[in-house]
Amino acid sequence: MKIATAAYPPSFLTSWKDYADKLTDWTRSAAGDGADLLVFPEYGALELATLDGPDAALDLERCIQATNARIPDADALHADLAAKFGVHILAASAPVLDESLAPRPVNRARLFTPTGAMGIQDKQIMTRFEREDWDIVPGGPLRLFDTALGRIGILICYDSEFPLLGRALAEADILLIPSVTEALAGHSRVRIGARARALENQCVTAMASLVGAAPWSEVIDISVGRGGLFGPPDTGFPPTGILASGALNTPGWTMADVDPEAIRTVRRDGVVLNHAHWPEQHGRDAPAPVTRLR
């Protein structure tokens, strides 16, 4: 299969047609290059808030309401594009109000298949901005999606920096990591997390990023990032573990071919067997005793 990860620039939209045309162009481009799975970034859906005007887009609370109201239409568009182009699409995540979970919004990504199926994944651990300034809350549990492309898990941005969340998705062949970061340091943290999860689980991780300026938003006013695909630096994969890496802050797709058999092979007979040997750590998560050396 071929996986495409986006370095996606958010737009100030003047009409729904602007949004539909943009998503269609991006999907057509990736599908035209043979991509089977398209990964869009975290909070890319906030561009939908601009359809309610600049004041709504810039306000922390109103942008939630404006974006949330458009998600059903956005989901219908993504489902149509997935079917039309015969691809799987991870839509850009959005602040979504789900009263069955919490009175405050969750950060939700949605995965669409060509057959019309859809799965949702909510972010598990909030960044300081999300919890201290924006009051976004954790959503539903981690899920593992069994698809025609293999088993897929989703770790939204900050979630990728926590190994036990990655371990909960250890049976995934592919971990999708949609992200948005305002500085190179933040981008580096998520990228390092993506590479570490690929090493630990001996799987492929696909990281998408929001890029560029959005002066109409307090949330995504400036975004630094690039697309990237990573595997374990072991049998059947590049010695660096880097399958593909986009240029920093340059909009476009970053793509790589992924062989599911290579994942099965490295887990079964790699030079090292991180996936198999992980349980040997069990019982070692208690704090180490302090030995005084002074």
Image (cartoon, rainbow, N blue to C red):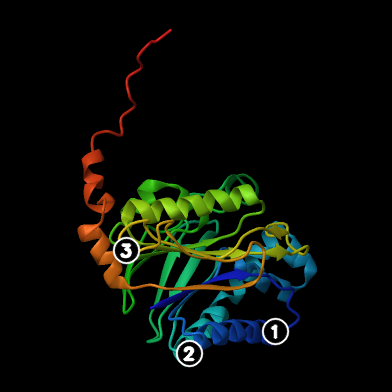
| The label number, if any, that marks residue 85 in the structure image | 2
Closer to the N terminus: mark 3 or mark 1?
A: 1
Q: Is residue 244 left or right of residue 142?
A: right
For numbered disc 3, what is the local secondary structure? Answer: loop
Is 72 positioned to the left or the right of 237 in the image?
right
Work out whether residue 35 or residue 145 is closer to the camera in this orientation and state it.
Answer: 35
Quadrant of res 169: bottom left
Residue in the picture at 59% in, 81% down: 26
The amino acid beneath tag 3 is Ala
Crowd rating for badge 3 (residues with CA inside 10 Å; few <14, some 14–19, many 20+): many
Is residue 97 visible in this depiction of the protein?
Answer: no
Vertical comparison of 76 with 256: above or below: below
In whole angstroms, how far apart are the C-alphas of marks 2 and 1? 19 Å
Closest to the observer: 131 or 4?
4
The answer to whether mark 2 and mark 1 are in CB contact below 8 A is no
Q: CA distance from mark 3 to mark 1?
A: 35 Å
Look at the numbered discs 3 and 1 and tell me whether their residues touch, using CB distance below 8 Å: no
Q: Quadrant of the C terminus?
A: top left
Whether tag 3 and tag 2 are in contact, CB under 8 A, the answer is no
Q: Where residue 172 is drawn, which disc sits there? A: 3
> In this image, 73 relative to 256: left or right?
right
Residue 60 vertical position relative to residue 87 in the rendered view, above or below? above
Instruction: Locate residue 37: give its quadrant.
Output: bottom left
Q: 93 above or below 167?
A: below
Residue 259 position within the rendered picture, expressed as x and y whole percent measured from the top left: 33, 73
Q: Which residue is mark 1?
A: 18
67 and 24: which one is in front? 24
Q: What residue is at 41 percent from the left and 50 percent from the top?
A: 196
Residue 44 has which mark?
none
Q: Position of residue 168 (x, y in %)?
A: 32, 53
Residue furthest front in the image: 239
The residue depicted at 56 percent of the width and 48 percent of the height is: 127
